[in-house]
Image (cartoon, helix red, strand yellow):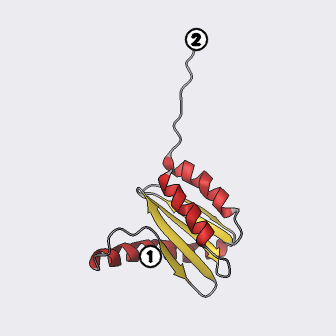
């Protein structure tokens, strides 16, 4: 008789599924989810992939650096507002998440949803 083997879903896979739901919200144009070994990207405009990847990486890095140097404590999330797009970035454990939003859309609902991912 063979035994069923339970396969544990990784945190990144779980977050990806949650981000797919977030991507369905009005105004969300994509996301980047990355950890030390993988990256998952879902963007409406793949031509902006490199630009968004750089923006995502730098936003988190600069935010953490400034918070440490200015002794602001832990950074919960970082929001950058550009001419056409907003990006909300945060870290959950060692996983980095960035969500890209049309600038005209209010992002509070999206930010609230992203913050709830950190607790799940």
Find residue 80 and report its horizontal and vertical position in percent.
52, 80
Point out which mark residue 47 bears. Answer: none
Where does the image place residue 111, in percent across and percent down from the top left?
A: 56, 68
Quadrant in the picture for residue 29: bottom right
Name the quadrant of the N terminus.
Answer: top right
Residue depicted at x 66% and y 69%: 28
Circle 2 packing at 10 Å, graded few (<14), some (14-19), many (20+), is few
Q: Tell me what residue is drawn at x 50 percent, y 69 percent.
A: 89
**Mark 1 or mark 2: whose residue is earlier in sequence:** 2
Give the residue at x 56% y 48%.
Answer: 14
Looking at the picture, tell me which residue is in the foreground, 34 or 102. Answer: 102
Whether the residues at callouts 1 and 2 have beta carbons within 8 Å, the answer is no
* Residue 75 percent location from the top left of the image: 39, 70
Q: Is residue 100 visible?
A: yes
- Please give the residue where the numbered disc 1 appears in the rendered image: 58
Residue matched to label 2: 1
Rendering quarter of residue 114: bottom right
Left or right: 116 in relation to 30: left
Q: Residues within 10 Å of mark 1 (few under 14, many from 20)?
A: few
């Amino acid at each position: 008789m063979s035994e069923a083997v339970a396969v544990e879903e990784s945190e990144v896979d779980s977050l990806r599924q949650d981000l797919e739901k977030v991507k369905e919200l009005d105004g969300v144009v994509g996301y980047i989810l990355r950890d030390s070994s993988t990256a998952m990207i879902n963007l409406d405009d793949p031509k902006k992939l490199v630009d968004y990847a750089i923006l995502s990486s730098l936003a988190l890095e600069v935010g953490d650096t400034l918070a440490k140097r200015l002794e602001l404590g832990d950074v919960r999330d970082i929001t950058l507002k550009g001419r056409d797009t907003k990006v909300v970035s945060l870290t959950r454990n060692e996983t980095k998440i960035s969500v890209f939003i049309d600038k005209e859309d209010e992002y509070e609902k999206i930010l609230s949803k992203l913050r709830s991912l950190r607790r799940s």
